[in-house]
Each structure stands twice: as structure tokens, then as C-alpha cells.
Image (cartoon, helix red, strand yellow):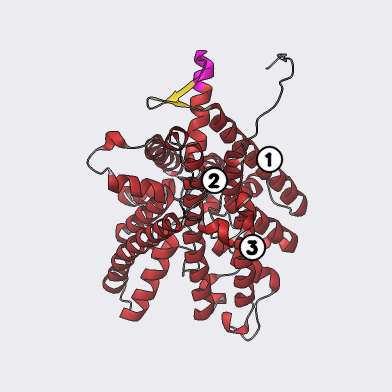
């Protein structure tokens, strides 16, 4: 019998949330120290502590919000530090979430309940190696493919020399796959708004990273027999596709005649930019038009998509599409008067429904408190502040342009929201799933009036 690797290394594995939070906090502190070095900036002065901290947290949490102009302020060394934090954050998120998901599934799996096994419930060395190796392989392979396409386009379409083309191709491929949204251009990807050879690879990379490692593994293993896909994979794929279509249609229609966004393009350019911005809120953070000039209704649609986010155990943020769609099924069952909730021929446990509700409501609370605090600290309008708060908590990185102007207190608040939004849903969901208490007695039942 092999002792679990994580159990041997850290006795606190029974509290995985603590390990995840401390790990990300340590990485953020190290990144802050590197970005605070004089070598990280273009000028002679080193970055201030708040600027270094905000940028490090934004990169590690794969958000993309910035308080300084990335290509103008940071040196090549600083950009490489940011890129390293993005890669570390993306790999860490997928690996951590996948391992915690495996731990949860083992603890509550039918096989474990039916077989009399004496092995530990903790992850063993083979599991850890397999998950880590799989995450790294999938990530690097997808990033490589996108980097090659972007490099060729930069070199042939824009006259970049080979070194610059490779650097820009690799940087934006890693940033896109990890849903980070950092760009080497002052106005993000606005210079390429109508170029499908730049926009489409970025969209595909963002979507791939946002689906999550467990989904990709299952798609590969059962690529010829989709009927064997798990409920999680089906929920993630179907909901992601529906939200993508809804986002593209809603944003394209709302901005079609807006001269400050899509209105200045031809039909092809409008469609390209519309598709790009329909995909970005979930949750990459690149923009090909000026988000600050979008209609109020469009900003609200973006907020909804950002809050929902992408797939679990992926690089996307938000409450995750599975949380959102599970609650939708719960509402549907309640409206129909069904005694239980079902999806894709399976019954959804009451425990999972409660976990989804807890994650969603706590996330709403975090966004509301953050919005209220930022409204108090800044002079900006509600729609701007709400957009910024949701973008930070959902680790998206889109902005109406106020990030650099919210002041030191606002920057620290947004950094906290990014950190909470990145590690919060992962650790909260796993902690709720792993807490298995039984009551020795029940109190008398009474129904309060609802509604």
C-alpha cells in the first residue's frame, strides 16, 4: 500500500484550500519581487510596490487587467516575468483543480463505495504524475500550435523579423490559451480587429484553455464514442457552445451600428469583431474594439458572460459554466414540481446542488461588496465600476479604461478580487465537497413562507 504523495508531504492535505491559497500567495509575492526590480522596467526607476503587486497578481491569476502600458512600461525582462507568471498560473490552476477534482471523485465515487479497499483516499504518486504530465502536455501542445500560426502571420503579414515574430507569437499564444489577456500592444489587439489569422487562433486558444483539462482528456479517450462522455463534459460543451452563440449574437447586434466599435467596419469586419468579442468575456480579456465605447446593454451582456465564465479545471474564471447550468436545471425541476433534478439521463445529487448555490451566491456577494467599495473609492459611474469589479473577480481582464485611475486603494481592492476570484471557486468547491459530516439528530421540520 502506497501512502498518498500529498499526505506525506503536507499533513494539511485534509484542508486543500489552505495549500492552494498559500501556494498562489507565495507565487504572487515572488512575482511582485521580480517585477519590482529595476531591470523589469524600461526606465531607470523601478516599479512601485502597488504596480508590481497588481501586475503580478493579474498575471498569476491570468486576468489581464493592467495599471501601466505593458509594452511601454515593462522591459523585455519584465515581460518575460509576466509571461512566466501567466504560464505558472495557468498550469497551476489546471493542475490544482484537476487533482482536487480527482480527490473528490475518489472519495465519493461509486467504485470506492462498492469495493472493500484498504488503500488511502488521498492521491498517490501515480495519480499526481499522470495529472501533471497530462496538463503540461496538453497546454504546451496547444500553445505551440497557436504560436506557430501567429508567428507565421506576424512575419508574413506584418513584416516582423523572425525573432520579433516568434516572440510576439509565443507571448500571445500563451496569454490566449491561459485566458490571460496580456498583449504586447498598447491597445490590445485592436490593430488586428479584422484579421482572422490573428483573431481566430486567439479565439480557439482561449476556448481550448477555458474548457478544462478533464474535458480534453475525456474527449481524447472517447473521441469515437461520445455516448460515454460524462455529465461534466456534456454540460461543459453544450453550455459553452450556447453561451458563445448568445454572446456573439447579442454583442454583434447591439454594436452593429455603433460608430465607436463595430460601426466603422465593413460587414466582414463587423462579423469578425463581433465573434471575437462574443468569445472574449469567457474569459480571455483581449479586445479588438474600444470596450469603453460600448453601449450600456452590451456592457451588461459582457458582465453576465464574465460572471459565468468557462469550464472547471481550466484557465477560465467566473463561477464556471457547470455551476451556472446546474442551477438552471435545479430551477427547471422546481418549476415543474419534480422531486429531484436530472441532466443528461443522470440524477444530480442534492449535495452538488447546494455546492453550486453556495459558490454562486458567495460570488455574487463578493462582486456586490467589491462594487460598493469601488463606488465609494472612485468617482466613476456604476456601469463602469460594476464592469471592472466583475472583470477582476471573474479574472477576465476586459476594462472600460478606468483600471489605472482607481487609485492605490482601488488597485489593492481589484488585486484582492482577482486573487479571490481565481482561487476562491476552486478551493470553496473542493472544501464543500470534502466536508462530509453526519448529524446525530434532526430538528423538527417547519416551512417558512418563500416569495
Q: Residue furthest left?
A: 224
Label 1 sits on residue: 365
Seen at 48% across and 33% down, the residue is 325
Label tally? 3
Indicate the position of residue 197 as horizontal and vertical percent values.
30, 60
Seen at 52% across and 68% down, the residue is 85
Q: Residue furthest bottom?
A: 44
**As drawn, is 27 to the left or to the right of 412?**
left
Indicate the position of residue 285 as horizontal and vertical percent values.
49, 55
User: Is the residue under label 2 in contact with that under label 3 (CB below 8 Å)?
Assistant: no
Indicate the position of residue 53 as horizontal and vertical percent values.
65, 68
Q: How would you rate the neighbour count of disc 3 (Cα within 10 Å): few for under 14, some for 14-19, many for 20 or more?
A: some
C-alpha separation, residue under disc 3 versus residue under disc 2: 19 Å
- When the figure is inspected, residue 340 is found, relative to residue 410, above or below; the finding is above
C-alpha separation, residue under disc 1 versus residue under disc 2: 13 Å
Of mark 3 and mark 1, the one earlier in the sequence is 3
Q: Residue furthest right?
A: 376
**As drawn, is 241 to the left or to the right of 308?**
left
Determine the secondary structure under disc 1: helix
Label 2 sits on residue: 318
Seen at 33% across and 55% down, the residue is 200
* Res. 289 mark: none
The answer to which of 448 and 122 lies nearer the viewer is 122
Of mark 1 and mark 2, the one earlier in the sequence is 2
The stretch of residues the image draws in magenta is 332-340
Label 3 sits on residue: 25
Amino acid at each position: 500500500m502506497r501512502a498518498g504523495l500529498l499526505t506525506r508531504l503536507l499533513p494539511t492535505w485534509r484542508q486543500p484550500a489552505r495549500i492552494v491559497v498559500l501556494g498562489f500567495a507565495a507565487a504572487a509575492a515572488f512575482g511582485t519581487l521580480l517585477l519590482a526590480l529595476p531591470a523589469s522596467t524600461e526606465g531607470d526607476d523601478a516599479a512601485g510596490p502597488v504596480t508590481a503587486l497588481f501586475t503580478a497578481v493579474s498575471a498569476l491569476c491570468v486576468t489581464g487587467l493592467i495599471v501601466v502600458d505593458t509594452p511601454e512600461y515593462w522591459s523585455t525582462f519584465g515581460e518575460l516575468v509576466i509571461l512566466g507568471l501567466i504560464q505558472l498560473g495557468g498550469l497551476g490552476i489546471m493542475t490544482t483543480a484537476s487533482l482536487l477534482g480527482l480527490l473528490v471523485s475518489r472519495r465519493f465515487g461509486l467504485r470506492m463505495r462498492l469495493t472493500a479497499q484498504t488503500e488511502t483516499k488521498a492521491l498517490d504518486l501515480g495519480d499526481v504524475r499522470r495529472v501533471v504530465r497530462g496538463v503540461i502536455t496538453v497546454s504546451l501542445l496547444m500553445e505551440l500550435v497557436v504560436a506557430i500560426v501567429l508567428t507565421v502571420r506576424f512575419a508574413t503579414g506584418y513584416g516582423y523579423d523572425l525573432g520579433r515574430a516568434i516572440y510576439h507569437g509565443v507571448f500571445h499564444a500563451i496569454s490566449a490559451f491561459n485566458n490571460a489577456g496580456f498583449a504586447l500592444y498598447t491597445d490590445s489587439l485592436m490593430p488586428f480587429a479584422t484579421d482572422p489569422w490573428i483573431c481566430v487562433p486567439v479565439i480557439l486558444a482561449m476556448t481550448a484553455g477555458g474548457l478544462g483539462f478533464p474535458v480534453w482528456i475525456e474527449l481524447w479517450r472517447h473521441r469515437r464514442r461520445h455516448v460515454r462522455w460524462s455529465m461534466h463534459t456534456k454540460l461543459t460543451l453544450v453550455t459553452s457552445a450556447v453561451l458563445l452563440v448568445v454572446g456573439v449574437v447579442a454583442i454583434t447586434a447591439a454594436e452593429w451600428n455603433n460608430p465607436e466599435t463595430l460601426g466603422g467596419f465593413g460587414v466582414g469586419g463587423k462579423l469578425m469583431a463581433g465573434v471575437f468579442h462574443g468569445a472574449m468575456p469567457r474569459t480571455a480579456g483581449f479586445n479588438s474594439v474600444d470596450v469603453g465605447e460600448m453601449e450600456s446593454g452590451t456592457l451588461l451582456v459582457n458582465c453576465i458572460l464574465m460572471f459565468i465564465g468557462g469550464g472547471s479545471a481550466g484557465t477560465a474564471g467566473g463561477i464556471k459554466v457547470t455551476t451556472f447550468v446546474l442551477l438552471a436545471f435545479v430551477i427547471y425541476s422546481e418549476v415543474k414540481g419534480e422531486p429531484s433534478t436530472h441532466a443528461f439521463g443522470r440524477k444530480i445529487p442534492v449535495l452538488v446542488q447546494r455546492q453550486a448555490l453556495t459558490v454562486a451566491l458567495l460570488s455574487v456577494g463578493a462582486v456586490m461588496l467589491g462594487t460598493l467599495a469601488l463606488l465609494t473609492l472612485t468617482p466613476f459611474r456604476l456601469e463602469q465600476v460594476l464592469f471592472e469589479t466583475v472583470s477582476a473577480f471573474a479574472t477576465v481582464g476586459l476594462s472600460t479604461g478606468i483600471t489605472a485611475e482607481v487609485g492605490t486603494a482601488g488597485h489593492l481592492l481589484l488585486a484582492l478580487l482577482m486573487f479571490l476570484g481565481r482561487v476562491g471557486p476552486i478551493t470553496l468547491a473542493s472544501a464543500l465537497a470534502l466536508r462530509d459530516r453526519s448529524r446525530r439528530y434532526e430538528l423538527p421540520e417547519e416551512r417558512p413562507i418563500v416569495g
